[in-house]
Image (cartoon, grey):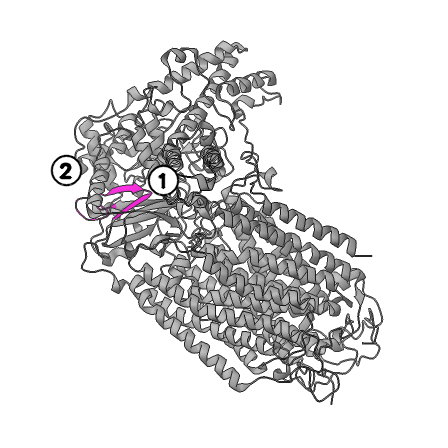
Amino acid sequence: MSQATTHAPHNPHLEPGEGEAGTVREHHDHHELGFLRKWIFSVDHKVIGLQFLFSGLVFLALGGMMAMAIRYQLAWPWRPMPGLAWMFPATGGAISPEFYTMLFTMHGTIMIFFVMIPLLTGAFGNFLIPLMIGAPDMAFPKLNMFGYWTMIPAFFFILLGFFVEGGHAAGGWTSYPPLSTIEAAAPGSLTGQTCWLMGLTWVGVSSMMGAVNYVTTIVKMRAPGLTMMRLPLTIWSLMITSLLQLFALPVLTAASIMQLLDRTMNTGFFTPTNLVVNNITPDSFLYGSEGAAAGGQPLLWQHLFWFYSHPAVYILVLPAMGFTSDILAVHARKPIFGYKPMVYSMSAIAGLGFIVWGHHMFTSGMNPALGMTFMVSTVMIALPSAIKVFNWLGTLWGGRIHLRTPMLFACAFVSMFIIGGLSGIWMAATPVDIYIHDTYIVVAHFHYVVFAGSLFAIFAAIYHWFPKMFGRLMNETVGKIHFVGSFVFTNMTFYMMHQLGVAGLMRRTADPYAYDVYQHLQPINEFITISAFCMFAWQIFFVVNFFHSMFWGKRVGRNPWNAASLEWDAPSPPGHGNFDKQLEVYRGAYEFSSPEVAEDFIPQTRKV
Amino acid sequence: MRYLFALMLLLVPILGVWTFVEADRWQLWFPQNVSSFGGEIDGLFNLIMYMVAFTFIVTEVALAWFVFKYSANRPGKGVFTHGSHKLEMIWTAIPAVALLFIAFAQMETWAKVKFESNFPKDGKYTKEKPIAELWASQFDWRVRYPGDDGTLGTVDDLERSYEFVVPVNTDVVFHLRSRDVIHSFFVPEFRLKQDALPGHTIPVWFRAEKEGIYDLVCAELCGWGHYKMSGRMTVLSQADYDKRMADIKAEWFSNGKEQGQ
Amino acid sequence: MSLRLPLVAVSGLALWVSACQLDKDQKPARPVVHYSLSSATTALGDDGEPLIPESAQAGIAGSLEMLFGTPQAPIYQLLPEWKDEDFDPNWPQYPKGEDGSGEVDPAELVANNQMYWRRQLTAIDAGLWDRVFVQDFTPDLLADWKALCAQTPVEARNEEFKKAARELFENYYPKLSASAELYRQHCLHCHGPEGGGDGPTAPFLNPRPRDYRHGTFKFTAVGKAQPRREDLYRILDEGVTGTSMPSFRRFSQAQLHGLVDYVRLLSMRGMVERSLLATYKEEETLTSGDTIDAYAEVWEKWQKADSKVLTFEGEVPAPTAETIAHGRELFMDAKTGNCLSCHGPEGRGNGASAFAVNPESGKVVPTYKDDWGNEIIPRNLRLGIFRGGRRPIDIYRRIKYGIAGGPMPEAASSLTNEDIWHLVHYVGSLSERPQHKAAHVDHAADHGGDHASEKH
C-alpha cells in the first residue's frame, strides 16, 4: 500500500462514457462542486450513502435515548425521569403512562424504520453497491437522490408527531387497530398516529426507490467479467433485500393508506361494528361520533402489516449477514466457506420469509389450523440460518485471523446471531408461543438479532469501510475499547431478558410490579437498566472515534485490509465516478490465501 | 489480546448456560403450572431448550476456539478451501431433520389447546354453554356469568369485575370478548394466552388442576392503561365455587342493606 | 490531536459511574408532589390581576396545609372537640369506624392481607428472606420490614422472628402518607395531585376523571349527599365500567381503605378551599376561626352520609315479561317516568331534551352540563354499560335518587317503588340479547346494537 492517494476526486484517466451511468461524471472531472451540490443535492451514491449514514446515526442516538427512558421506568417506575421531569410538573417529574406507551412505540419505529433499514440498505447499500460491482454510480442517480430526499418528509412527520396534541403514536410499532385507528382509543391516536403513518409511508417510498435502483444496478451495471456468482455476498444480500422490499413494501404502503383512510375518511377497513371506545361508538351517529363505516376486521391489518414486517425483519438482518461474510473472509484471510450455499440460504430465507408472517399471530384469534402451517414454515426458516452460521464457522476455521475491530464486531455478530436465531425456535413452536408470546423472551430475541446482531454488523461495516469512506482509518485501540464494552454490556442488558420472559413478564407494561407474579422481577430489571445505561454511555467511544478519525485519523491507501473485492481498487475515498482505471474481473471476491500467488490474496481484477 | 477476545466469546455460552441453570433458583423460571396442558407446554419448551442448548454450546465454543486458535501468529497462509459439499449436506440434513422433529412434536399440544374441534364436549361447560363470558375493555376485565336460566345475554346475568372464579379439575370453556380494542387473556400459571378481538367471540378452554389465586394479565397493548389491566383468576373447589357463586348472586340481587352494598 | 487523555478520562469516569451504580442498592428519590390551589382561587380578573389577592391566596394555601398537610405528609388536623370523643381520623383508629361511617372488620382485613401477601408469607414461612418482596408503593411496610430485618441477622431468625414478620404483613394497614404514595403511583396521573381530575392523562379521557374537590361523587348509595366510605370503596373495588377507571382490586383491602382515606382527605381539602374562597369573597377577609369552622362543617357533612343510605325493604323482585313491559310503558310515558325525553325512545341516550342546536355554530350540542362544567349526555342504555353498576339495586338507586352532580333527576316523588323496579327491569333488559346457539357466536358482536330492540 505504497500509494498515498488522498482526496482525489479528479481523475484524468477516466474514459468518458464508461458504464451506462457514466454520463453524470464526465463533465465534473475538472471543477469542484459547490457545497450544496456536493453534499446536499448530490447525485453521487457515496454522498447519498453518507447522508443516510449520518441521519441514521442521529436517529440511532434518539432511539437509544428513548430506550434509556424506557429502561429507567422499568427499573424504577414512577420516579422522576432525568431530563424529562420538566414535562410532568403535576406528578413531580414521573412520566405518565401514555408517555411510556409513546416511548416504546417510537423507540421501535425509529429503530426499525429510521435507523436499521436506512443504515443497512440506505447507507451501505448506496455506498457499497456501485463500488463493489465496479460501477461508476447507481443506474438511476437522480432517483437515488430522490430516495434520500423522500426521507426528509419522513423525518419531518416522525418528528412532528412528538409535538402534536396527545403526543406521538402510542399503539406499539405494530399499530394494531382499533387502538390505532380510533382517535378516542389512545392519546397517541389523536394526531400522532397520522404523523406516524405519513412518516412510514414516506420511508416506504424511499425504500422503494432505493430497491428499484439497487436491483437494476446490480443486474445491469456489473463490471465486465463480474458474473453473479462472483459477486461479494454483501451485494447478494443487498440484492435479495431489495427484492424483499420490492415485493413486500406495496403491501405495507397499501395497509398504511387504508389505516390513514380509516382515521381520516371514516372508512372501516379495520374497525368492527359497535365498539365502545372511551365512551364513543365510532360507527354510530350519536353525539360525539362521526358515523364511521365499520364492519372491518382488526386481523386484516395484522395480516397486511406482518406480510411486510416479517420480511422486513429479514431486511434488517440479511445485509448484516452479507457484511459479516465479507468482513470475516477478509480478516480471516480465507475464502468464504460454501459461497453457493450462502447465496442459496439467503435466497431461501427471503423466499420462506414471505410465508411465515402468521407466526406473529399465533394467539391473535386467527384460525389455529393456519398456525400449524405457519409453524412448519417458520421452523424451517431456521435451517438456512443454521447453514449460514456453520459456513461462517467454516470460514474462520483454518484462517489467519487478524483481530481488528471490524473482525471483532463481525465475530460478535455471529455469536449474537446464534443466540437470537436459536431463541426464535421457541417462538416458532406454537404451543410454546402461547406462553411466551408478548413476553420479554420476544424482546430478548429481536434485540439479539437486530441490536446485538445487525447493529454490531453495522459497527463492523463502519470500521471496515471507514477507510473507503474517508480515506482514513478509525483508531484501533479505541475501537477495541468500544467493542469490549459494547459486547459485555449488550449481553448484560439483553441476556437476562430471556429469563424474564420465561418468568412470564410481558412487554409494554409501564409498571409490571403491581402484579403478584412479577413483583420479584424488579431487581433483575434494575440490573438490566444499569447495564443498558453503561452500554449507551459506552458508545461515546464510537462517537469520539468516528468524528476524530474522520478528520485526524491515519491516512491510508486504497486497500488497507488487503481485501480482494472491487471497492478496494478505487481510491480512498473514491472520487466522482469511483474508479480511475478500466476494470476487468477474473475471479470471485474471496481469493484469500490462494497458493497461486505469493501474497495471501488475489484482487478480483488481477489476472494471474 | 486474543486471549481476552476469545474469553469474551467463550463466556457467552458459559454464562448463558449458567444463567439458565440458575434461573429457577432466582425465581426467574416458569411460575408453577396449574393447567392440564401446561405441563406439555413446559415439556416442549424444555425439549427445544435442550436441543437449542446443544447447538448453542457447540457453535459458540467452536467460534471462540477458532477465534482463539487461528488468530495466533501462525506462519504461512490460511487453508485455501471454498467449502465442502459433503459438510454442507451434513449440516443441512441434520438440522432439517431436527427442525422437522421439533415442528411435528408441537402439533398435538397445539391442536389440543386451540382447536375448537378438540374442546371439551361432554363436560358441564361446552363451547355452546360456556361457564361465563369474559369481557375485556380499557382497562378492566369483567366476567358475566349466566344467571339461573343458564343463558348468557339475559337480564338475570351476573356481572363482576376483576375476578374470574372457576371450579378446580373441571374442563372450563368461556367466551372471550372485547368491547373496544384488542386485549389478551394471559394467565402465566395456566400457560394460556388468547387475544380478545373486538367483533369476535372467541371460545377458550382450560382445566385448572390446583386451587389458588392467579394473576390474570392483559398481554396485548391496549392503550395507556395496559399495565393497569389486571385481573384475578380464582380456582376453587367445587363446593367453594358453588358457595362463591351463591354469594355473587346474593350480592347481585342485594337490596342494599348489607355492609358496603 | 491526541486521543489518549480524553479517552482515559472518559473510560475511567464510565467505569467509576457504573461501579458506583452497581454497588448502591439505592433507587432514585421519590418525586416531590405539591398541592396547588384550584383555578377558581387563582383565577385572574379581566384586568390580568388575580381576583383574590396573592396574600389571601397564600393564606388559604397555608390554612389548607395546616389542616391537611402535604402530599408527602398528609394529615387530618384534629378538632378540639374530638379529643373528648377520642376520635382521630388519622390512622390507626380510623377504619374502625368511630365516625359512624362504615365499620371495617379487622378480621376481614387480616384475611385479605393473608391472601394479598401470600407470596411473602410463604417465603417467610420457608425462611427464604431474599424472596420477600415488598412493593414500592407500600413505603411504610417496606421501612418496617427493613427495620425488622436489620434488628435480627439472618442466622438468628427463629420462629419468633417469623411470627413478628408474619404479623407485620398480616396486620398491614397503610399510613396516610403511604396511601398518598400509592395514590401518586396509580391515581395521580389521572386525578391530579389535589384530586382535581387534572393529571397529565386526564385530557384524553372521556368522561373526565372525577374532580373530588366539590365533594360530589356520582355513584353512591346515599343520593346526593357526601358518599360513605363503602361507596368510595366500591368504586375502587369494582371500577366504573365504561370509563377509564378500572377495578383496583389488585391492591389489598387495607390499601383500598387507605386510598379511601386519602381520597376523602383530598375531597375535604377541596371543599374547605371552596368554602374559604366563598367566605373571602363575601367578607374580604379570612380569620383562623373561619378556617376551623369550614373544616368542622365539611367534616359534619361527611359524617352525616351514613344516615342517608338508600336501601330497599324486602327482596329484589325478579324480572318477568310483565314487569319489563310495564317498565317500558313508564319509560315512554311523559307524565310518570318520562325517561325518553333524555334517554330517547329506544334508550340510546339521544332524547330530544338532552340536545339543542347551538344558534351560533348551528351544531347540535348537549343541553346539560354537570356540576364540574363538563357537557354531559344521557346514558346510552343499549350498551349494557352502567357506570354505577348493573345490579338491580344500583339502577334502582340511580332512578330513585338521581345522580349527584348531573341532570338525572330524583324519581322518588313521582314513582312508587314498584314502578321503579319495573323500570329497572326494563332498563336492564334493553342491552340484552340471549345467545341461544353457538352458531351465532361470531355474529353476537353487535351486542346491544340495532337488533336488540327486535328481541323485546
The amino acid marked with disc number 2 is Glu
Q: Which numbered mark, 1 or 2, is in the foreground of this view?
A: 1
A202 with respect to A24 (left or right): left
Q: Which residue is mark 2?
A: C322
Q: Nearer the viewer, residue A367 or B155?
A: A367
Q: Residue A595 at what x, y percent from top left?
A: 70, 88
Q: Which residue is mark 1?
A: C116
Q: Is residue C242 visible?
A: no
Q: Nearer the viewer, residue C98 or C393?
A: C98
The local secondary structure at tag 2 comes to helix
The amino acid marked with disc number 1 is Tyr
Q: Nearer the viewer, residue A534 or A544?
A: A534
What chain does badge 1 belong to? Answer: C
The local secondary structure at tag 1 comes to helix
Q: Which region is colored magenta?
A: B145-166
Q: Residue C116 at what x, y percent from top left?
A: 36, 40
Give the residue at x 39% y 71%. B102
Quarter of the image where the C terminus of chain A is located: bottom right
Looking at the image, is A382 positioned above or below residue A276?
below
What chain does badge 2 belong to? Answer: C
Quarter of the image where the N terminus of chain A is located: bottom right
